[in-house]
Amino acid sequence: MVIGTALGWSNAGTIALAVFLAFVFGYSLTMVPLLKAGMAVAVALPLAFASDSFSIAVMELVDNGVMLAVPGAMDAPLTNPLFWGALAFALAVAYVFAFPVNRYLIARGQGHAVVHQSHGHHEAESVDAAAPMHGHDHEDHADAGSGGGLGSPRRLIAIGLAAMAATIGIATAGAMFVESRHDNEEMVMEDHGTSGGHGSAAAELSGLAVAGDGYRLAVTDTTLSAGEATPFSFSVVDAEGPVRQFDEEGGVRMHLIVVRRDLTGYQHLHPTLEDDGRWQTELTLPDAGVYRAYADFERNGKKTVVASDLFVAGQFTPETLPAPASSVEIDGYRVELDGHAEAGVETMITYRVTRAGEPVDVEPYLGAAGHLVALREGDLAYLHVHPLAERLGEISFAATFPTAGQYRLFLQFKGAGRIQTAALTLNVGWAH
């Protein structure tokens, strides 16, 4: 399980490897004392197959079934405590099932009782070799090699291999079924997040609701005063209450994105998590209006964005969205956007950053060369983008825009120790 997870294998491949190695090590551990006692491999191997096949099968079907049943366990990386906790729990549950199975087999003279019987036969044979006048019938040895009368060595080996193959097949089929259902659910969720018609496609859109993926955003106070630095707090809540464990992404565990609904006043903050599960920061909203606050976080390797509106009373005049442009000047930097986007097609968005005509070697920011947030005009849907490998003076991202229309792109990068924010409007055309 650890090997498959570390190598990034699919659930089916990981479980197939886990079951195979369980049989290999299970049989090997049973054979070790027999071989040390001088028993031949051809005799010890059928004994191992006779004693262990059923109990290993039960153990593997139960513990892999539990791993598949624990939400997010199979998708969690090795650095996530969920993986190790689920693995320990799965083994404990499997032990509860396997123990009575072994007790039952031993009571009926099967399972590991066969191995114990073989020890007696082998010792008797050693005594007879030293004192042949006892007339010991060496058919006993043949009986030990056949698993205490359970069948021929070839038959026992065939049974063991069949048990291994069947267990791998059942466990792998279960993993593929769970994986298929998970993929179908994601496709349905993505389809629900896109509009039908020409050019629509599944994409990672979020931030349209206050709840999603089993979480809800609970904001302490959604009404703030204009121009005042105000303590702002919120919690991410699941069925058990405020969530306290989050994955670290780019050195932080929570991104708080705040923007007014006319796509002005963009802010990107990293609040602090308190012991009670509340995230806290100081927030200043300079002007009146309705703002959208996005909580962008990752748990168990899955990205989630939930959002809520914030209200600032006062005179409010919405600003018109700037027309699409290919470049913007900020604080002495020139940022050029290179990217033709069509709905439903993965697009590479490349920014070129220069200063005084020379490419800028940007400093790492949040574990990458830059951070990009794309918001759709109208409903402010939050689009996930993925950073790609950068070159000197270039920052690239991959994104799939689900619909045609205009999107406001907020690029943040670090230069000379300061965070810069470049906002540009991108027009996404219909797919051809």
Image (cartoon, grey):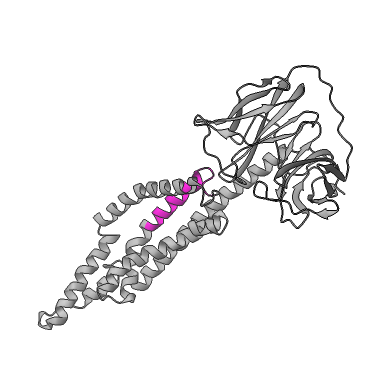
Q: Left of 239 or right of it: where is 98?
A: left
Q: Is residue 246 above or below residue 45?
A: above
- Taking the magenta stretch, the answer to whether it contains residue 70 is yes
The reply to whether residue 85 is in sight is yes
| Quarter of the image where one finds residue 113 | bottom left
Q: Nearer the viewer, residue 37 or 48?
A: 37
- Taking the magenta stretch, the answer to whether it contains residue 11 is no
Q: Residue at x 60, y 23 (%)?
A: 220
Question: Residue lying furthest left in this view?
Answer: 133
Q: Is residue 360 above or below residue 384?
A: below
Q: Residue at x 57, y 53 (%)?
A: 176
The x, y position of residue 108, in whole percent, is 25, 56
The reply to whether residue 151 is in sight is no
Q: Nearer the viewer, residue 117 or 10?
A: 10
Majority secondary structure of magenta residues: helix
The x, y position of residue 31, in whole percent, is 32, 69
Q: Residue at x 64, y 28 (%)?
A: 282
Q: Is residue 266 above or below residue 340?
A: above
The x, y position of residue 379, in whole percent, is 77, 31
Q: Magenta segment, which residues?
A: 56-74
The x, y position of residue 65, in whole percent, is 47, 49
| Total count of labels | 0
Q: Left of 385 or right of it: where is 137?
A: left
